[in-house]
Image (tube, grey):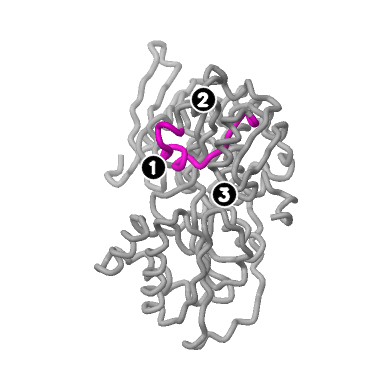
Amino acid sequence: MSQDSKLKINSQVSADGVVHTFHFSGQIDVSAGAALETINDIPASSRVILDFAEVERINSMGLAQLMKLLEQWKNLRISTEARNQNRMISMLFKMTGLNRYFGQNQIQAEAKTQARTVNAASVAQTATASSSGTPKLRQIKRIRVVKKQQQQSADVKLAFSVSLQSNQQLTGWYFFNTLLQRRLEKAISMDVKQPGQLADLHQNALVYAKPFEACKLIEKHQFIPVARPMNDTDEVSIIIRKSDADKTLADFSGASVVTAMQANFVYLLGRFLCDECELDSAGLNYSFTGNEIKALQTLLKGNADLLFMLKKNYHELSRLSREDTHMLDESETAMAYHMLLLSPDYENLKPLLTETLFNLDQDEKGRQVLNDLGLKGWCAPENDELDMLLMLYSRYVGQQATAF
């Protein structure tokens, strides 16, 4: 195995030599090829079980390495079974078509789930391998409109809109804007949107957007994803009253759901989680209160059966606020996050902008700004994550996108 490989494999073979079980741990990326080559010599007509319980992440190049091995086993009539995938890995397998390698029962379950989804025919298409052997997510159309570049002299003021994640960030964003003006040598006018506040953002040069807003800007206005906060993603908690704690999601067919806003990834992730757990989200009745506290009160008053709430906000509630609730399930997708996006009219600023953001931790002023924002740093959004984010947006917003 290569010393650079981030993947470790522990093997077990049944007494009769027919069943081979491989426990993966670490990351499956381009370096996984050497590790996977150590398990490719399996006798024809064997059975292979792949255990992903300790896999931290799989990226597109890792999927390519894995698919190469699975295709080889398929040609040898070796049956394969996947176990203990987390939701992120399960979604990757579905979107790239790798599920087709993992047993008839899993294929049938996938077909059943897709059949219940309202827009399954248009959004749940699995992709095939490219000529290089790399599995592709369904391609999201990102049509780049060629526009005449705006005059970008030093005295042109750039409009920057920030969607706050919390009011504690407010001072940090003003310091960030001051630092950004100095390092870009551009005048920047910043407009701050409070949590839950909707706005038309596409007229701005720069936008720090919530996941839902980011998808809309990318799909409709060709905005360019530049950076996202490290280790900071949006997840959903599905909450019920404590008196219903003995129930499972399957018991809530046709139930009423309350959440803060429809134009929000908490709503989209909640629907996704329901569908993944065999509860048809299209058959649920939704109401929107405008904020999460009102949504929680609606649940506790008995005017709704389920609550979709931002995971970190639910866990930050006081013990008193949570004592009459029960957390039924939570998402673990790690793909919905706030993003800093750049208008296509200002694409030439991207190199300097990324250099500035990714090196903020290299000097005292930059570290102080990160601390004021409550961020560990900035990193580039992964293309696979963006494609999954846009696919989920398309799946549940679809033709209704014009309404938001």
Residue that badge 2 annotates? 81
Mark pair 1, 2: CA separation = 19 Å
Rendered image: mark on residue 132: none
Tell me if 62 is positioned left or right of 278 in this view: left
Image x and y of residue 238, in percent: 54, 33
> Residue 66, can we see it?
no
Mark 3 or mark 2, which is nearer the start of the sequence? 2
53 vs 255, nearest the viewer: 255
Q: What range is drawn magenta here?
A: 303-321
Q: Is residue 267 above or below residue 48?
A: below
Q: From the image, which quarter does the N terminus lie in? A: top left
- Give the quadrant of residue 227: bottom left
Is 275 included in the stretch rendered in magenta? no
Q: Is residue 375 above or below residue 278?
A: below
Q: What secondary structure is marked by label 1?
A: helix
Mark 1 surroundings within 10 Å by alpha-carbon count, few (fewer than 14), some (14 through 19), many (20 or more): many
Rendered image: mark on residue 389: 3
